[in-house]
Amino acid sequence: MVILHSNSALDQWLAAAGGPVHFVPTMGGLHGGHQRLIRAACGAGARVLVSVFVNPTQFAAGEDFTTYPRHPDGDVQQAGAAGADAVWFPAVEHVYDDANPDHTDSGGRPRIEPSLIRTLCGPWRPGHFEGVLMVMERLLERVQPALVVMGEKDWQQLTVLRQCLPALREKRCRLLPVPVVREEDGLPCSSRNCRLGAAQRRQAALAPQALQDAEAAVQAGERRAAVLEQLVRARLEAAGLRVDYAQLVHPLTLQPCPRLDGVALLAAAVHVGPARLLDHRFLLSRKPIIAIDGPAGTGKSTVTRLLAARLGLLHLDTGAMYRAVAWLVLENRQPIGSGKALQKLLETMELRLAWGDHGQQVIRINGVDVSDAIRLPHVTATVPRVAALPEVRQVLTRQQ
Ligand code: AMP
């Protein structure tokens, strides 16, 4: 494990890395959540770099910049134990050497889509996300990693960076998000947790429980955001926590959702003693839809079947549906292309997917069991051309 301080030491290490670099940016005070990120970054012959930098530009006046937990020796030890190859401790002047904190792009537009910071922490921490974007842009510019690993614990931060950080937008770097890692009492691991006394800790642990109660209300049929938000707020306040917000938003746009329809993010920020803590839960009003894509012959169907069985979801083999239409086109000796004949075929087609006694998939088209026939080589060869026809896509997407 190498410890890096200066820019030149970092540059030398990067030059010697001899392969892709996977990067885990942190503010230190490392804990089990950070270690999960580091473990996720390991593999594929990559060298794993962890940065420890308490970024001044993301703290407003009166926030805890000076008292933020700093434990460099512990950070090195924890990073090494999780598999990091190097820990980089940049100094403020190494990151902000050009002293040009500009929050707008070259056209004078704000660099963060304003709607992303109108909800959740945005109004409570003015300038925070601009500071996060600024530091991440500079760190990525210097490291140029193939992959950056970040936590879902800071969901709004992750969403802002995913949508606004040039290296991610332009796909110069991949992003690997990691789900929230929690302590035994359910509290998300956080550098600030170490500041809590035993009683505050018990109080804080009521936050994840309040979110869980909201989830139970959803399972009992509640869909109204105002009711779910009030339920969480009331629980938190009853626990003696000062609440900044409890808000239901769309997970990608971060816009408020008046009702839960599909999937939404219920997030809360609270103050306990000296710490401000965040937590969230995804709420679903229906079972999730998971799409698995990839090149032919890589085991998509097998993985999907196993995953569906494991999660108790319905397995919908959309590939088989396209194969069945290809089989029908061939059976009708029709030319492959758009036109009246295809239109008629699609209008009159009856496609049924069912599951046999042993869980095997049975696919019928116009009453004919084509489960085996759709796997024949001449059908396989035809599927891509049939699947590319817009009419076919439209009809099958609707049916799916
Ligand atoms: P921080 O040091 O708090 O700035 O966090 C550095 C990275 O670790 C960010 O991408 C965080 O989202 C992530 N992280 C922090 N705590 C957790 C956690 N409990 N679970 C998952 N990721 C986390």
Image (spheres, grey):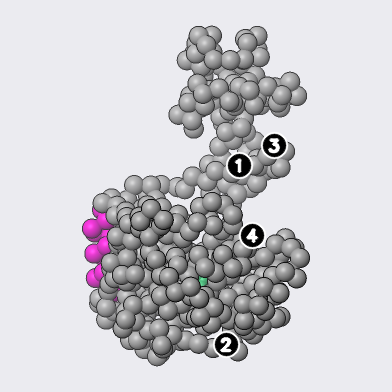
Q: Dots 1 and 4: beta carbons under 8 Å? A: no
In the image, residue 32 sits, relative to residue 333, either above or below, namely below
Q: Dots 4 and 2: beta carbons under 8 Å? A: no
Q: Between marks 2 and 3, how big is the CA–CA gap? A: 48 Å
| Residue 256 disc label | none
Q: Give the residue displayed 52% in from the left and 46% down from the top.
A: 290
Q: Between marks 2 and 1, how big is the CA–CA gap? A: 42 Å
Q: Dots 2 and 1: beta carbons under 8 Å? A: no
Say which amino acid is labelled 4.
Answer: Ala
In the rendered view, does 388 fall on the left or right side of 134?
Answer: right
Say which amino acid is labelled 3.
Answer: Ala
| Residue 146 disc label | 4
Where is mark 3, residue-wise?
296
Residue 156 in view in this figure: yes
Q: Dots 3 and 4: beta carbons under 8 Å? A: no
Mark 3 packing: few (<14 Cα in 10 Å), some, or many (20+)?
few
Mark 4 packing: few (<14 Cα in 10 Å), some, or many (20+)?
some
Q: Which of marks 2 and 1 is nearer the N terminus?
A: 2
